Image (cartoon, rainbow, N blue to C red):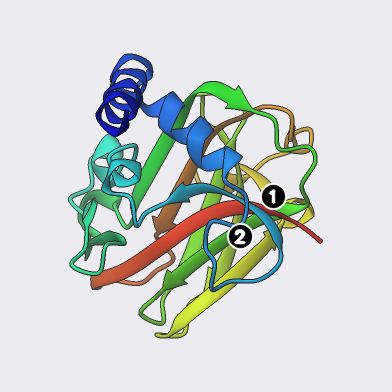
Amino acid sequence: MITFVIQVVFLVVASSGIQALNDFLHANRGQIAEESGDYTVLFDFRSPAATSAWYARNDNVMGGISEGYAQVSTNNTLLFAGDIRFENNGGFASIQTIFDIPRDVSAYDGVVVWMKGNGDRFGIYLRNGTGGLAYQATFLTSGEWQEIRLPFRAFRSIRSGEPVVAPPFDQTRLRSMSVMNGYNQPGKFAVEIRAIGVYVE
């Protein structure tokens, strides 16, 4: 019976890909047992498969030469690391995930991130589509593990890094999410992210 269950789970994940993983994590509310609060985990990076849903998107899209990447750390977290450089009008590195089916997070009040930073400022970017319009909220890390809560009302609309006038973020259509280092902070960096979710105040 155990073998049969394992085979079924494997087949479901293999056939549905990243979306099946995301749905599974979304259904397991309160999966980060040592944290408190009313939240739903979208990505638990203690599962290596969750890290594989994220990929680098750096300033080389506009000619820059900064580096950034995501991989499983030795602590079974997502390691976001790289080197920020300003040549060729560059200056940012980011990691991103795209949901195959937009997620409805209208029942929640904001994004929660459990991470250990390096003292740099980072940003969370949310998108309703795959175009250039994004919604940004930034925060400072401390060098220690933090639970960072960013209410949806704090996210501001931007395009190509500049503020723009746009409707508020549509919480019924979370299409894409990014984590960025790109706030005039040159040099190498490395941070760990344990999980990302959404919370209710």
Query: Which mark is drawn over residue 156?
Result: 1
For the view shown, which residue lies furthest in the top direction? 15
Pair 1/2: label in front:
2
Direction from residue 139 to residue 192 in the image, left or right: left
Which tag, 1 or 2, sits closer to the chain's start? 2
The residue that disc 2 covers is 112
Residue found 29% across the figure and 41% down from its top: 49
Residue depicted at 71% across the width and 53% down the height: 110
Residue 89 or residue 135, whichever sits in front: 135
Query: Label 2 amino acid?
Result: Val
Mark 1: which amino acid?
Arg
The local secondary structure at tag 2 comes to strand
Query: Callout 2: few (<14), some (14-19), or many (20+) C-alpha neighbours within 10 Å?
Result: many
Q: Is residue 18 above or below residue 32?
A: above
Q: Percent from the top left, x then y, of residue 183? A: 44, 65
Res 201 quadrant in image: bottom right
Q: Position of residue 109 (x, y in %)?
A: 78, 52
How packed mark 1 is, by other alpha carbons closer than 10 Å (few <14, some 14-19, many 20 or more), is: many
